[in-house]
């Protein structure tokens, strides 16, 4: 009598190319079978349920200061370059803990108040209208190349007081830094380009920072160099590092929000019509876009104290990957999670901008950019429709977006 062996699914690999391009089958499997598991491919724990991810984002036993711990595997010939990168990243408020984080955030927060962001809205409108003016006579466009990519980088260059002529260079440098950040320095060959990018960014920003110290203007760099809290202020290196952070994080995420948000609406014509009929639904629509196609699918933390979780023990010194995108599709938090619904009754904050004291400082700015770009697109191109049968996704281990999105109108 033959013994029947039950078929087993292959081991989950969170960085497999197919899982980076289209992660939703993996998300379902993680949520159902492996909400907490050790991934041998990355040498890290992976946590996927909304409740757990949300809690760990706020847990003092989880540290965002993880790059030093990841440096042990760097090839000897790249250690000096990697040390330079880590030194710069250690001044990103995204990557440090208190009291350094509190100090950096306190000194930077004042540049991102609701009043400050409201004052930036006309600039965002001007950039969007300029871009749409250029394509409207054609009757077709690539949402990525013609709007989602140039809009945030032109806008951010504007509020930083940088020349827009450097846009192509800034895009390439941002990509090189984001690959390093997205893979925590693990992507093949990512260290030399990231090192070069940070050096070049420093060359771009340092003259601007020095000039704004002498003669402040109405821009974000001036706001950062002139802010004083209890006699403390940011150093030139700290201003430069956080300008790099705003560019890399703000550019990539907003590009993905605009492009993927447009795709989600075009894939769901009933929701598109609903939004066109009632623009007051835009805030909820942005929330749903962030949940459904998040610009950032994961983040990572360093465990600084043993943490028991769902029958497992995450040990001190181990890396934990928090699957934001999986948490956003958790049916225990969002009923019918694979349904795109801009009027969703359960409006739990999506995990896409993180949580706790590391909640993205630029989240309100990103939402405003998304609202302005998508609002203008729907108003000016009311007959917007997809001009392709299939879209191509791109993704590294953190960011995820579209290569192109051809539409006609």
Image (cartoon, rainbow, N blue to C red):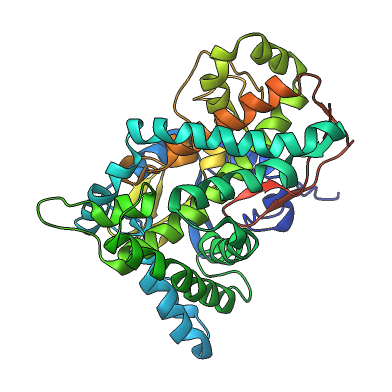
Instruction: Write the residue at 56% across / 61% down.
Output: 174
- The location of residue 142, given as percent across then percent down, is 79, 41
Q: Quadrant of residue 120?
A: top left
In the shown orientation, is residue 206 left or right of residue 269? Answer: left
Q: Give the quadrant of residue 234.
A: bottom left
Question: Residue at 84% of width from left, 32% of height from top?
Answer: 137
Residue 172: % across, % down: 63, 64
**Closer to us: 269 or 115:** 115
Residue 181 placement, left or right of 54:
right
Pick the quarter of the image with the C terminus. Answer: top right
Residue 50, visible in the rendered structure:
yes
Residue sitting at 19 percent across and 56 percent down? 99
Tell me residue 67's x, y (percent): 41, 68
- Residue 281 as seen in the image, left or right of residue 383: left
Residue positioned 33% across, 67% down in the render: 210
| Residue 385: x %, y % from top left | 83, 26
Return the residue nearer the eye: 393 or 6: 393
Q: How many marks?
A: 0
Please say if 354 is above or below 166: above
């Amino acid at each position: 009598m033959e013994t029947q062996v039950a078929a087993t699914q292959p081991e989950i690999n969170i960085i497999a190319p197919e899982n980076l391009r289209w992660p939703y089958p993996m998300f379902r499997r993680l949520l159902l079978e492996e909400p907490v598991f050790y991934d041998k491919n990355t040498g890290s724990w992976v946590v996927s349920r909304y409740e757990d991810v949300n809690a760990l984002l706020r847990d003092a036993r989880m540290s965002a200061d993880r790059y030093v711990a990841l440096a042990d595997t760097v090839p000897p010939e790249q250690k000096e370059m990697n040390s330079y990168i880590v030194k710069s990243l250690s001044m990103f408020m995204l990557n440090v803990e208190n009291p350094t984080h509190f100090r950096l955030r306190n000194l930077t927060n004042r540049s991102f108040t609701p009043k400050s962001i409201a004052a930036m809205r006309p600039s965002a409108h001007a950039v969007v209208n300029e871009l749409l003016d250029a394509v409207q006579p054609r009757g077709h466009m690539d949402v990525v190349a013609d709007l989602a990519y140039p809009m945030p980088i032109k806008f951010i260059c504007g509020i930083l007081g940088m020349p827009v002529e450097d846009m192509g260079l800034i895009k390439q440098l941002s990509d090189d830094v984001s690959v390093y950040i997205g893979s925590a320095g693990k992507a093949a060959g990512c260290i030399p380009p990231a090192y070069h990018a940070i050096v070049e960014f420093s060359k771009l920003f340092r003259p601007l920072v020095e000039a704004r110290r002498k003669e402040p203007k109405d821009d974000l760099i001036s706001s950062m160099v002139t802010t004083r809290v209890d006699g403390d202020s940011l150093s030139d290196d700290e201003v430069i590092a956080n300008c790099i952070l705003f560019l890399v994080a703000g550019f990539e995420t907003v590009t993905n929000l605009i492009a993927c948000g447009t795709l989600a609406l075009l894939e769901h014509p009933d929701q598109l019509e609903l939004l066109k009929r009632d623009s007051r639904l835009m805030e909820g629509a942005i929330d749903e876009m962030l949940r459904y196609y998040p610009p950032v699918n994961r983040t990572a933390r360093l465990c600084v104290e043993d943490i028991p979780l769902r029958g497992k023990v995450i040990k001190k010194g181990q890396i934990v990957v928090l699957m934001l995108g999986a948490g956003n599709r958790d049916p225990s938090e969002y009923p019918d999670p694979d349904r795109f619904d801009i009027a969703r009754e359960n409006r739990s904050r999506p995990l896409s901008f993180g949580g706790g004291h590391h909640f993205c400082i630029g989240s309100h700015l990103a939402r405003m950019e998304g609202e302005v770009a998508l609002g203008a697109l729907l108003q000016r191109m009311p007959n917007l429709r997809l001009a392709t049968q299939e879209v191509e996704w791109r993704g590294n281990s953190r960011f995820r977006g579209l290569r192109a999105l051809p539409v006609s109108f």
